[in-house]
Amino acid sequence: MTQARRVRLDGWGLYLWLLIGLIPVVVPNGPARTAIVDLLIVLGFGAFAVTWLTKRERIHVPFFGPVLAISVGSILAVVNAVSPGASFVAMAQDAYLYLWFIMVVHLLRRRDLDGIRVTWVWFACAIAALGVVSLVTDAHLSLIDLARPTGRRAFGTFYDPNMFASYLVMSLFMLISLGDRMGRMLRWGACGILLLALVATKSNGGMLSLAGGLTVWAVVRGWTRTVSPMALAAGTLIAVSVVLTGVWLILGLGVGSSQLSSLEQESFLARASHSSEGRFKIWGQLQHTYAKTPLGIGPGNSRWTTMSVETRVRKDGLTSKEAHNDYLAYAIERGPLALLGLLAMLAQAFAKLAGAWRRRDEPGARGSSMGPLVAGLAGALVAACIHALTIEVLHYRHFWMLLAIVCSVEGVRERGRAEQPGSLEDPLGLPDARVAAA
């Protein structure tokens, strides 16, 4: 008991606990949108470097090939940058986040992911409750007013509501991935708080990403429960048939059309057309600019694109805004090589989850208990990929923490071996002194 308690309360465990708690606290911010968590990250870099130089532990470098392609494409695109300074800042931020990601993967690979995910969920519930309470008290709103199309939106401790929604959706899937490792009442209570905060953000992209993530979660959960492919296909066809029947009844026969129109006008769905109009202006201008510079206009240079008077999106000038789309931003700012690297990185992340499930029955693995974990993380990844169509999630620290957890799933088997009876290996030890690219 004494040794187990010491393991749980070791220094790096406390560091990860603080890291998960401070990641969503990005305001107030400092220069270049630095946050209080960045001080903790920099201190962690120093301690991690000392530890590695002392023990020469093995360091895994996930996504090395895709990140190399992204880096090469970004460097080539700087030649066409209107603001080279903005490009260098963007690439410095990329390097900073990736190095931090490698460090977190190294720290997580031999630790209990259940505790990490529970900690994430508890902090997320606290941030969600804070966002809802502050919105209701400051604006004197009722809970019904939270879903109206106009009015203030909840952003919690983030820059904007969309960023808050991205974090809440990931947190919901972290909660789902716990399965029965959290009590039923606690699960439903946490789910209610997170969903209420998500509604209060009035984020169309957040809701769309949640729907897509839940769809993939249901399919993967059925797969991990060894449901037959025919049963999965039948369930999918039934769901599609129900949706198409509803669409036919509304559009073809007009059943419930007035009620649906009233619901749309009185909910945040009414904002969808206005939001998409502004984004289409930005994307159209970026595509026109990209036609002249196929290697890319330079990382971080979307906001420096000049728009015409008719298509401008800023009231105080003709400069554009960020691309609000990770895939388009990579293709136009960094070129096709960087876009291929991004897609390869995401594909490798999904492959790691599939590989972890295939190895569930190997010695030291967790067997069928891996199912909720793999399904929840797959849903979170899909949700992030969908949300990346309307915001740039690669800028967010919580997205890289999600990727670190995905990569650390490969270490579950190693943890299982270390925890077997008679094992002399410290479950938190990292003895190998090599550097590996995964």
Image: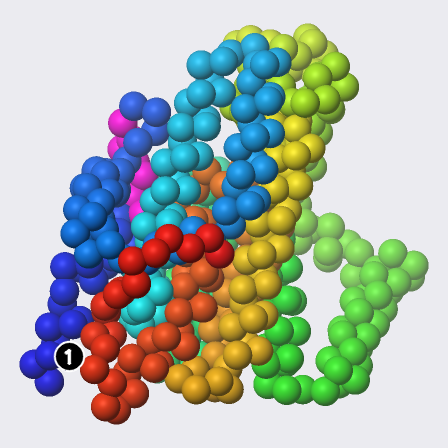
Q: On the picture, is 108 further left or further right than 94? A: left
Counting from the top left corner in percent of width and height, residue 63 is at: 51, 50
Q: Is residue 207 above or below residue 90?
A: below
Q: Main secondary structure of the magenta part?
A: loop
Residue 140 visible in image: no
- Snapshot colouring: rainbow
Point 56% across, 30% down: residue: 72
Secondary element at image label 1: helix
User: Which residue is denoted by mark 1 in the rendering?
Assistant: 4
Q: Is residue 344 left or right of residue 234?
A: left
- Which residue is found at the position 37% from the left and 53% from the top? 435
| Residue type at the position of mark 1 | Ala
Residue at 64% from the left image edge and 66% from the top image edge: 216
x then y, percent, for residue 324: 58, 33
Q: Position of residue 320 (x, y in %)?
A: 59, 18
Task: Please report the residue visible at 23 percent of the width from the left and 69 percent of the height from the top.
Answer: 428
> Can you say whether 400 is above or below 110 in the image?
above
Q: Which residues are magenta?
A: 23-30
* Residue 11 occupies quadrant: bottom left
Whether 363 is drawn above or below 101: the answer is below
Give the quadrant of residue 235. Answer: bottom right
Task: Pick the residue in front: 197 or 212.
Answer: 212
